[in-house]
Amino acid sequence: MRNISDVIEQYLKQVLKESQANAIEIKRQDIAQRFECVPSQINYVINTRFTVEKGYLVESKRGGGGYIRIRRVILHEKQDVLSSLMDVIHNHPRLNEQLVENVLVRLVEEQMMDEQEAQLIYHLLSDEALNLQVDDRFFIRRQQLLALMKVLRYRNGG
Amino acid sequence: MRNISDVIEQYLKQVLKESQANAIEIKRQDIAQRFECVPSQINYVINTRFTVEKGYLVESKRGGGGYIRIRRVILHEKQDVLSSLMDVIHNHPRLNEQLVENVLVRLVEEQMMDEQEAQLIYHLLSDEALNLQVDDRFFIRRQQLLALMKVLRYRNGG
DNA sequence: TAGTCAAAAGTCAAAGATGGTCAGAGGGTG
DNA sequence: CACCCTCTGACCATCTTTGACTTTTGACTA
């Protein structure tokens, strides 16, 4: 594994998978110690790898007895997945390639589209294809991702 | 061998051949060091020798733990269909919905994509999703259709 | 109860680690 | 000589790591 962030990410996902409940509670300091890094590294991992669009919810508490709780969001209805992703799209002012990728990966994970389709759309929404001013790029991505959600909704009998 | 680029090219192809998977991951700096050249020489080799037309796909990541991944892919046999469609796209100043549809239908007929994929893309490129000034719409459609062609060159057997 | 303190976790910006781009210099070949 | 590859290095973009400083919380004390 190339960097410590990836290692920590894998570790947390492993623990999450092995836990009965779909949530784990960690102590930031403990994890930092286990991987010999500074505590704020854990925040970095969480902020970049356990985001809402990837299907995670994170809560925490400071002070004595503090913790960080990571929850895997499990939505049984495909419609719920779509509306949650639509929220994400609406709430993100800056729809960069990374976010597009996260959304598409999630859709594949949730079996709402296959990899080939995701691949195609990723390329259509890439910086290279959307060779425009950044803000215009964000705008187009929003429009097209929402259009995608619409098609997927009715493809899945909505 | 006359120049360092050729040497590096051969080396990478050798490593690729010996690897089980049809992909390798390198560190630019490592390769540059091994052949005692500047790092950007590696980009030169990749840009001139590992192109899509030659059957290679390259991805990379910057920053800590960065890498360059080179993958061998199989080119689609219908390159001529793609180039003729690219001509069409280039030569049409006004890429309206009808033209998009025609292109997509042709791609489906040629079995370069399936109906579902065509459907998806049609919606992404619709007037409704591309809620912009007409000229901008034409521009985006051109960019994205060309991006689509690029992906289709190697899909289905990579 | 209010105040104080220590123990968490959060934020943010700087530094570090890679890879990418581009334009110009260098060199070989028809 | 002209032209086309190659090679190089300065500068840029992106992702990760680190640490100083901040905020929140609960326990203890006056």
Image (spheres, coloured by chain):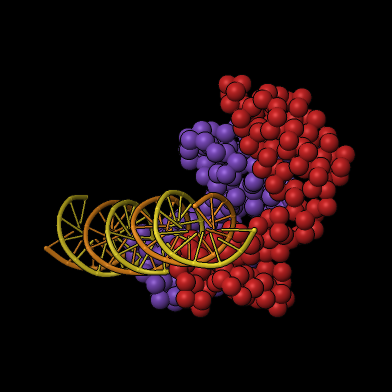
Chain colours: A purple, B red, C yellow, D orange
Q: Is residue B119 visible?
A: no
User: Residue B18: x, y in percent?
Assistant: 70, 78
User: Residue A44: x, y in percent?
Assistant: 43, 60
Locate the N terminus of chain A by quadrant: bottom right
Locate the C terminus of chain A by quadrant: top right
Residue B78 as seen in the image, left or right of residue A52: right
Is residue B96 positioned above or below C6 on the image? above
Tell which residue pokes out farthest to the top in this image: B134
Between C17 and D18, which is closer to the camera in this rendering?
Answer: C17
User: Residue A4: x, y in percent?
Assistant: 47, 70
Residue at the location (71% across, 48% down)? Answer: B151
Q: Is residue A100 visible?
A: yes
Residue at the location (47% across, 76% down)? Answer: B36
Residue A154 as seen in the image, left or right of residue B136: right
Is residue B132 positioned above or below A143 on the image? above
User: Residue C28: x, y in percent?
Assistant: 56, 67
Residue at the location (39% across, 72% down)? Answer: A37
Residue at the location (64% across, 73% down)? Answer: B10
Between A112 and C22, which is closer to the camera in this rendering?
Answer: C22
Q: How many marks?
A: 0
Place residue B58 in its image quadrant: bottom right
